[in-house]
Each structure stands twice: as structure tokens, then as C-alpha cells.
Amino acid sequence: MTNGLINVHIVEFSDLSSDQACFLFVSPSFLNRTVVLQLKKLGIDDLVHFDFMDPSAPETLMRALELLNYLAALDGDGNLTDLGAVMSEFLLDPQLAKLIGSCQHNCSIEILPIAAMLSAEAKG
């Protein structure tokens, strides 16, 4: 039985010696918008040729990039925007992260419980 948490160990690329390899394991079902946004935040721009241990279908990646562009997290060239950088700080679906990160009317306090309810998994 799992508790639904994901444990990620982050290592700076500069801390790796030349004979070490950096691998990222992401199951195909988890290569979604959130993972793409996090990889963009880490400066990994060429996601098509990124060496995933278990790559998912290219269509999945393309759909994620299209949605992130639609949400203004990525610009037309696929670069992370300022809003995208803010959205990547929240480990939420980017649609919810945009709600929280783009509150220009001081509504974050009201949005946070809504985002928490929408991101919670149903038990039972």
C-alpha cells in the first residue's frame, strides 16, 4: 500500500562528476503537464530528445506543451515565461497553479482552499 507521495532527490548538475550519469525516471502515466513544467524550470529545454528511462508517447508531450502554451506558462518558442516560473513553484496541476499564481485581485486566500479541494484524491 502506498501513501501517494513521491520522493524526489534533487542533485545539482554541477555536483555530478564527469563519469556520473543523470537519469530521471518518470512513469509514462506521470509524464504530464506538471512534470513538463518542472523540467522546463530546471532548464531542460529539449524534452523531445531528453533521455527518459521510460519515455511516453510523443503525443503526450506535445499535448502537455500545447496546454502550457495556452496557459501562458510557455511562450511561442517554448520558453518558460515569468508566470510559468511562478506556476512551477506549486506542485499542482498547472491549471490550478495558474489560478493561485496569477491572482491580480488579492484573491489568493480564497483560491487556496478551492485548489486544495480540487487537487485532493477521493478516498473510498
Image (cartoon, rainbow, N blue to C red):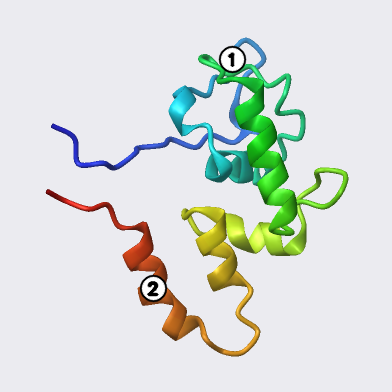
Q: Position of residue 73 (x, y in %)?
A: 71, 56
Q: Position of residue 6 (x, y in %)?
A: 34, 39
Q: Is residue 42 above or below residue 28?
A: below
Q: Position of residue 64 (x, y in %)?
A: 63, 40
Q: CA distance from mark 2 to mark 1?
A: 41 Å
The image quadrant that residue 95 belongs to is: bottom right
Q: Position of residue 40 (x, y in %)?
A: 68, 42
Pointer 1 residue: 21
Depth check, front residue: 99 or 88: 99
Is disc 2 surrounded by few (<14), some (14 to 19) or many (20+) residues within 10 Å? some
Q: Amino acid at mark 2?
A: Ile
Q: Amino acid at mark 1?
A: Ala
Depth check, front residue: 68 or 19: 68
The image quadrant that residue 36 belongs to is: top right
Who's the residue at 72% across and 40% down the image? 43
Who's the residue at 50% across and 53% down the image? 93
Residue 114: image tag? 2
Who's the residue at 38% across and 73% down the image? 114
